């Protein structure tokens, strides 16, 4: 099991929406790599993760425009 899929369920607490949040300080204390790992976990949770999505490639086609003679 990867470290991205582990959630510490003891780290959650219940608070009122009017309470001051320390989210900004929490994320600023994390390294950029840790922030990206958390973002990837959220992305996988919302959109799902399959081996097929990892292997999808971008495909593009070059379209030639007709040249107009003056």
Image: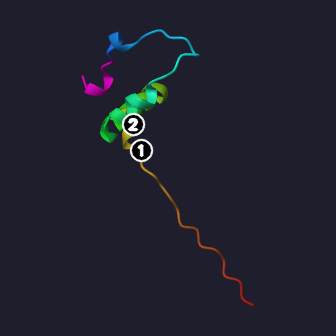
Q: Position of residue 4 (x, y in %)?
A: 31, 27
- Residue 1 showing in the rendered view: yes
Q: Nearer the viewer, residue 50 or 40?
A: 40
Q: Position of residue 64 (x, y in %)?
A: 59, 73
Residue 49 x %, y %: 40, 30
Quick one: label 1, few (<14), some, or many (20+) residues within 10 Å? few
- The percent position of residue 68, horizontal first and vertical second, equals 71, 83
In space, the residues marked 1 and 2 are separated at their CA atoms by 6 Å
What range is drawn magenta here? 1-7
The answer to which quarter of the image holds residue 36 is: top left
For residue 27: magenta?
Answer: no
Q: Residues within 10 Å of mark 2 (few under 14, many from 20)?
A: few
Is there a contact, CB below 8 Å, between mark 1 and mark 2?
Answer: yes
Q: Residue at x 41, y 30 (%)?
A: 25
Give the label on residue 52, or none.
2
Q: Is residue 29 above or below residue 21?
A: below
Seen at 40% across and 13% down, the residue is: 12
Along the line of sight, the residue nearer the viewer: 16 or 46: 16
| Furthest residue in direction front, as rendered | 20
Q: State whether residue 69 is above or below residue 65.
A: below
The residue under label 1 is 56
Between 18 and 65, which is closer to the camera in this rendering?
18
- In this view, the residue farthest toward the right is 70
Quarter of the image where one finds residue 54:
top left
Q: Secondary structure at mark 2?
A: helix
């Amino acid at each position: 099991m990867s470290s991205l899929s582990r959630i510490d369920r003891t780290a959650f607490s219940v608070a009122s929406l009017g309470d001051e949040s320390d989210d900004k300080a929490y994320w600023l204390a994390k390294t950029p790599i840790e922030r990206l790992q958390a973002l990837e976990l959220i992305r996988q949770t919302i959109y799902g993760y399959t081996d097929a999505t990892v292997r999808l490639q971008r495909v593009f086609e070059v379209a030639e425009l007709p040249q107009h003679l003056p």
